[in-house]
Each structure stands twice: as C-alpha cells, then as structure tokens.
Image (cartoon, rainbow, N blue to C red):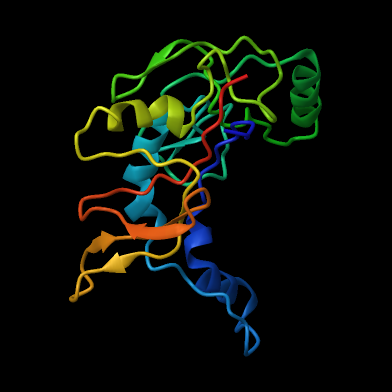
Amino acid sequence: MHWNGQTYRFLPSDFVAKSHNEERYGPLPEGMTVQDYGVTYDELEPHFDYFEKICGICGTAGNLRGDIREGGNPFEGPRSDDYPNPPMQMTFSQDRFEASARELGLNPFPVPSANMSRAYVNPLGLQLAPCTYCGFCEKHGCGNYSKSSPQTTIIPVLMKRENFTLRTDSEVLSVEKSPDGTRTTGSPTSIPAVRNSFSLPRSWCSVLTRLRTPG
C-alpha cells in the first residue's frame, strides 16, 4: 500500500551474480556468500510479463525481443511484450532532465510505474482509473484506484472463491510441507489479538501485504 509504484525488473545478470562477477573480475575471495540464483531471467520473463499485465505497469520498453528501442531502458533484459500502458506524463523538471541527459549522450527513460497513465482493466477483470497526479502515492493508499496493489489487482477476485479466506493482523510463522516435500499443507499463523497459532487449510495461498483504508 505504502509505495510510490516504481516497478523495475531484475536484470539478467542479477540472477547469475557469482558467475557474472567472476567472469568480469576473476575468482571471488573465499568466504563470500554471493551465489547464482537457481533460475534465470529467461525462465522468469513470462512471469514478469504477466505480473506487469496484472498490475497495468506503465512504461516504454527498451528491449523488445532483442530490438533496442528509443525512449526505453536500453540496458534491460529482453522482454516478450511491451508494457500494457504507456508511460506517465512528465513534468517540466523531468522534461528538462531528459533534454539535458540526451545532450550529454546518455539514455534517459521514464521509470516503469504502477500508477495508471490511463484507465485499465487487467486480465482478471479488475479496473483501475487513470492517475490524477495528486502526489500522495508514497504515504497513502490511492482512493482513486489508480495505483496497483494486491487490494486493487487480485484480492477482490480471490475473495469470490469459496476456498479463500482473508485474514488480517496475522503473521505467518512457517510453512508446513507434505512428507515428500513437494507441496505445502498449511502454515502456523500468529494473530496478536488472539495470541495463538493455527494452520490454514490444505489449499491455501499466502498474500504478503498490508491492508489499510485508502486515503
């Protein structure tokens, strides 16, 4: 809820931090804990794309399937599709910054934003309104439904499901697994008001968010 909406993707090199740095700078000193992820950017790219469509992210693609495009981030990993919405309008100071950066031979680009540049309906059928540029994104929820959050992009759909229960003021303490370790079976959860723990049903999903009243 309390975020401005900047929505960057990880770079391909972020997933291979150890091997990428060793390739560039040589073997790392012993005892360093840096390591490669177990997945790659290419494996996660379809999920990045779907997330951006669920949240209606606004921006300009700089690398569309390997094609470097003017106005976007030329250093980003290749994306399979453009952003679902165009970038937000720039203010006078941002226009001046862009012009000055280009005069220096740099590559300025609009920050990918979870604040809507236009009215948008996500793949789940939830509608977000265009941003009114009020400027209160950081410390407040959006009463205009113009900023993506779990409350505006997915929870209303989940609440219609019979096997979904929304629990507030709760803290997940651990995740229990089946004997073979292939699936989750529940999660001991602490509720401060009750001061005890319990396990959720076998079919469950944990949505990590803070729910607050917009305004």
Q: In which quarter of the image is residue 39?
A: bottom left
Where, quadrant-wise, is the N terminus in this rendering? top right
Where, quadrant-wise, is the C terminus in this rendering? top right
Left or right? Give the position of 70 relative to 99: left
Compare residues 55 and 185 and report the one nearer the observer: 185
Q: Is residue 30 above or below residue 202?
A: below
Compare residues 190 and 40 and report the one nearer the observer: 190
**Residue placed at 44% from the left, 29% from the top?**
151
Q: Position of residue 27 (x, y in %)?
A: 60, 84
Q: Residue pushed farthest bottom?
A: 30
**Residue placed at 41% from the left, 15% from the top?**
120
Q: Could you tell me if residue 9 is visible in this image?
A: yes
Q: Position of residue 107 (x, y in %)?
A: 67, 35
Q: Could you tell me if residue 83 is visible in this image?
A: no
Left or right? Give the position of 180 relative to 172: left
Q: Where is residue 166 in the image (x, y as percent from the top left)?
A: 36, 38
